[in-house]
């Protein structure tokens, strides 16, 4: 298997050399959070369209591995969907590029319109199983979520403190499926990133705060997390990496961050 | 002139041989790849724990990789689909082949062909929007995304295969059998069920085995209606199939989780192989008998 990979790599390298004679290609390597796949995908695509001789790569390994990779110099920019811990912040800089706001959605027929984070956690852990316990109708709660590897699920469970404890009725593989299922079941509750919430479902307010771009940017809406670019403190980025970094943190990048379903930082 | 013709003759035979070997090469390649990728994880997890473990929690802090829920779900789902789809399919085939007049038969045949051409994602979508809410209301469940919904969708999906293969088999029964039966005073119904169907038995069986293959290998449609939670199966529980276990986690998986997914695919592959062997056996026996 290794041998085969080697051969393929050599063939590809030759093909590449033959294809782009003379044009040296600069590479920007990113490594880390799987939740940031869409954001980094939209950003790098847009960037590579403008700068044809730069290639931005992405290695989906998880926030922890991404931070470790920057520390060991294995990549230019680390991607983290959690804030840096204090011991990590000694040697690393974290720059927020986007914010991930996760809406908690219910069927429009549902009379419940506000929950606390504790209530949401208890619902998903199966401690609260009937809507009447949180001020709704006397009906069982149907928990809808995402598949185990989903970034949205990871974000939701870490914020509501329900990791590996959720008693799902359905684990769906796309945000669209979650919205569709909640829309068709009056007893369902689900979660989805803000951008994909439609009129067919009702986004409930969390601890009295309605979800919107503004409440996410101001930090009032609680179910949110930062998408962070991690760089080394005492060393400079390569020219091409710095250029990409600047692009991703500029106002220009906002539209791509929005298309990726995240919320841009207030600049 | 003759030499040119000879050359073309040779060339075509080489091309045909190459194409033949290409098909074999793909089978060997896929089998080899699956075995190579699928076995290490089974070794690491332990074959008994892997096949008979009841808990699948691939991304938990202390992961657990038991695929018994997937295996049982796939088996139950397929059995359910066969129970639901095969009788309808066979009766429909009898209707097309023996009862309906020409116009009606060709109309139904057209509809069946159309049914087989519908992409599985469309089955899933319709299932999700129509069948899931229907099951929820009809059985007064909190949620309709259950094994039962998946069985309904699979039952419909195997219909076209069962119908067209059975119909061909029924039509192949010599007319003399029927005429003899009718001449002896048997009614039309008696003739169909006691003479025609038994004579077409192995052809119908082939259709059933094809249906089983189709339903055990289906991923997209069942993923959208079965709820996709790794529970031990129950008719009105949210369940995950072998196919959907691979499809839903593969894109982001890493490490042992990824290897274990290849192992799940290997188990699925073994199931399909067994079904194909049964099919070969049935067809062979048919030829000899």
Image (cartoon, coloured by chain):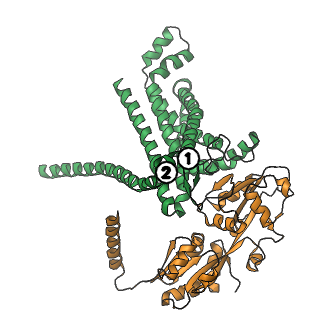
Chain colours: A orange, B green
Assign a secondary structure to mark 2.
helix
In this rendering, position of residue B84 left or right of residue A126: left
The image position of residue A236, as x and y in percent, is 51, 91
Q: Return the chain for callout 2.
A: B
Judge the density around disc 2: few (<14), some (14-19), many (≥20) Cα neighbours within 10 Å: many
* In front of the other: A191 or A62: A62
Quadrant holding the C terminus of chain B: top left
Q: Residue at x 12, y 49 (%)?
A: B2
Q: Of callouts 2 and 1, which one flags the residue occurring earlier in the amino acid sequence?
A: 1
The image position of residue A115, as x and y in percent, is 81, 64
In this rendering, position of residue A49 left or right of residue A141: left
Residue at the extreme top of the image, as rendered:
B184
Task: Tell me: residue B274, above or below residue A189.
Answer: above
> Do labels 2 and 1 touch, CB within 8 Å?
yes
The image position of residue B282, as x and y in percent, is 41, 30
* In front of the other: A88 or A198: A88
The image position of residue B15, as x and y in percent, is 25, 52
Q: Return the chain for callout 1.
A: B
Task: Tell me: residue B82, above or below residue B272.
Answer: above
Q: Residue at x 52, y 40 (%)?
A: B113
Q: Residue at x 73, y 44 (%)?
A: B136
Location of mark 1 (residue): B70
Q: Which label is found at residue A157?
A: none
* In front of the other: A57 or A229: A229
Location of mark 2 (residue): B264
In this rendering, position of residue B254 left or right of residue A142: left
Q: Is residue A203 visible?
A: no
Assign a secondary structure to mark 1.
helix
In this rendering, position of residue A130 left or right of residue B152: right
Judge the density around disc 1: few (<14), some (14-19), many (≥20) Cα neighbours within 10 Å: many
């Amino acid at each position: 298997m290794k041998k085969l990979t080697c051969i393929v790599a050599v063939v590809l390298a030759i093909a590449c050399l033959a294809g782009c004679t003379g044009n040296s290609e600069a590479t920007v390597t990113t490594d880390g959070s799987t939740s940031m796949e869409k954001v980094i995908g939209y950003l790098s695509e847009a960037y590579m369209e403008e700068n044809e001789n730069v290639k931005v790569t992405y290695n989906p390994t998880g926030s922890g591995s991404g931070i470790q990779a920057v520390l060991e110099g294995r990549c230019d920019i680390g991607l983290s969907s959690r804030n840096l811990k204090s011991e990590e912040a000694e040697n690393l800089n974290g720059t927020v590029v986007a914010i991930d706001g996760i809406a908690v959605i219910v069927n429009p027929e549902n009379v419940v319109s506000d929950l606390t984070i504790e209530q949401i956690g208890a619902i998903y852990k199966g401690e609260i199983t009937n809507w009447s316990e949180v001020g709704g109708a006397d009906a069982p709660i149907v928990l809808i979520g995402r598949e185990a590897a989903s970034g949205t699920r990871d974000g939701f469970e870490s914020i509501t403190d329900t990791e590996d404890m959720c008693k799902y009725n359905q684990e769906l593989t796309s945000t669209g499926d979650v919205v569709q299922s909640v829309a068709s079941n009056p007893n369902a509750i689900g979660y989805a990133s803000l951008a994909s919430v439609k009129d067919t479902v009702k986004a409930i307010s969390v601890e009295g705060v309605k979800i919107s771009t503004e409440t996410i940017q101001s930090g009032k809406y609680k179910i949110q997390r930062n998408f962070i670019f991690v760089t080394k403190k005492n060393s400079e980025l390569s020219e091409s990496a710095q250029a990409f970094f600047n692009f991703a943190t500029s106002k220009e990048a906002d539209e791509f961050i929005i298309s990726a379903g995240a919320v841009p930082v207030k600049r | 002139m003759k030499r040119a013709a000879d050359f073309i003759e040779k060339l075509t035979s080489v091309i045909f041989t190459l194409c033949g070997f290409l098909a074999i090469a793909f089978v060997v390649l896929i089998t080899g790849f699956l075995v190579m990728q699928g076995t290490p994880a089974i070794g690491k997890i332990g074959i008994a724990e892997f096949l008979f473990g009841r808990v699948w929690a691939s991304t938990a802090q202390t992961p657990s990789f038991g695929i018994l829920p997937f295996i049982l779900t796939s088996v139950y789902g397929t059995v359910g689909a066969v129970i639901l789809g095969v009788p309808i399919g066979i009766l429909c085939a009898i209707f097309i082949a023996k009862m309906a007049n020409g116009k009606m038969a060709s109309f139904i045949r057209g509809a069946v062909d159309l049914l087989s051409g519908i992409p599985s994602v469309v089955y899933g979508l319709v299932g999700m929007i129509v069948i899931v809410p229907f099951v929820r209301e009809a059985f007064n469940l909190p949620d309709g995304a259950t094994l039962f919904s998946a069985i309904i969708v699979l039952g419909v999906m195997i219909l076209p295969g069962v119908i067209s293969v059975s119909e061909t088999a029924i039509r192949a029964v010599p007319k003399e059998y029927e005429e003899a039966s009718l001449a002896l005073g048997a009614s039309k119904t008696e003739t169909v069920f006691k003479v025609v169907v038994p004579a077409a038995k192995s052809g119908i069986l082939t259709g059933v085995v094809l249906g089983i293959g189709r339903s055990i290998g289906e991923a997209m449609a069942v993923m959208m209606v079965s709820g996709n939670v790794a529970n031990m199966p129950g008719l009105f529980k949210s369940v995950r199939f072998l196919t959907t276990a691979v499809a839903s986690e593969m894109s982001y998986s890493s490490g042992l989780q990824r290897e274990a997914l290849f192992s799940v695919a290997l188990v699925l592959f073994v199931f399909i192989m067994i079904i194909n062997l049964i099919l070969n056996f049935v067809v062979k026996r048919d030829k000899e008998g």
